[in-house]
Amino acid sequence: MAMPLKNIAGQRFGKRVVLEHVANGWWNCRCDCGVVAVASGTLLRSGRSQSCVACAPKRQPTHRTNDERRAARQASLKKYFASEKGKAWHARFLASEARQRYIRSERHRELKRQRNKSEAYKRRRCEYRARTEVRAKEAEQRRAAYQKNPAPALTCVARRRARLAGLADDLTPTQWAALLNLWGGCAFCGSQKRITMEHVIAVSNGGGTTLGNIVPSCRSCNAKKWKLDLEEAARRLGFDRARFIEKQRAIIQMVQMQEAA
């Protein structure tokens, strides 16, 4: 059974005078400054709500600032080292190995400060910053070149994978340029965008980077072919396998004739 509501209308609690009940134990109150606001009856009777927000006294921060903590810590250390226990600890520290390590570390810091002030060190720092800026610019240029044409970088990756697998890697830049010129684009779809080096027999299946195993391919066909053999790739990409083999043989013969000439 709910407790009956105690009527506190007209009563004063601090700077607040209760006017009327609103709902569920909340009361309209007028502060001495004239502000009318809602307050909880429980807080009014317990003394925790005696004025409006504007008239409430400013609370002092209970936490300490960093400077206050530092000052308190220093005062505590001074008090400790002034005591007999602190003096005994300090005497043991002076005779210990820790004291020698502390002296060496202080000497090292002093030498480091002197080195930082020398002209030779400042010159080396300037040279290091210059080299860092040059390397950053070169990296940015390589990144921009890769975004514009990622084929050379992907080609290097493919050839490195073949070398690590112990496969043949004798395709020369001249042969690759001739293949690009004679194929005129992607060997599977004819596209001329984003051309990469494609292994007819995939590296994972033992295919090396040789003249007879490399054709130019766009990145889309390269991804679709994956590690499939030529027959499965023809079904997936929709090209004529026999015509592809015939054209590849003719192009290889033309490249060999150009090299012989």
Image (cartoon, rainbow, N blue to C red):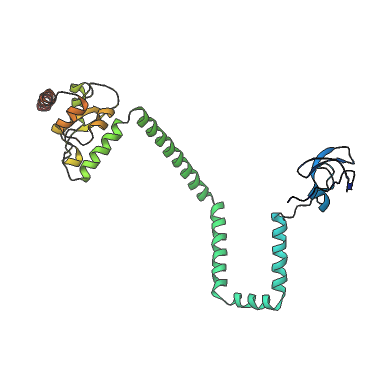
Quadrant showing the C terminus: top left
Q: Say whether residue 93 is visible.
A: yes
Give above or below for 70 relative to 237. Answer: below
**Residue 238, horizontal then vertical, whole percent:** 19, 24
Give above or below for 163 relative to 144. Answer: below
Relative to residue 16, is residue 199 drawn left or right? left
Displayed quadrant of residue 69: bottom right
Q: Residue most toward the front?
A: 1
Relative to residue 19, is residue 242 drawn left or right? left
Q: Residue at x 42, y 34 (%)?
A: 140
**Residue 102, horizontal then vertical, whole percent:** 57, 68
Q: Residue at x 69, y 68 (%)?
A: 77
Q: Residue at x 24, y 42 (%)?
A: 161
Which residue is nearer to you in this view: 152 or 65?
65
Which residue is nearer to you in this view: 31 or 29?
29
**Residue 47, horizontal then vertical, whole percent:** 83, 52
Q: Residue at x 54, y 74 (%)?
A: 97
Q: Say whether residue 261 is visible.
A: no
Which residue is nearer to you in this view: 23 or 41?
23
Displayed quadrant of residue 236: top left
**Residue 11, horizontal then vertical, whole percent:** 89, 46
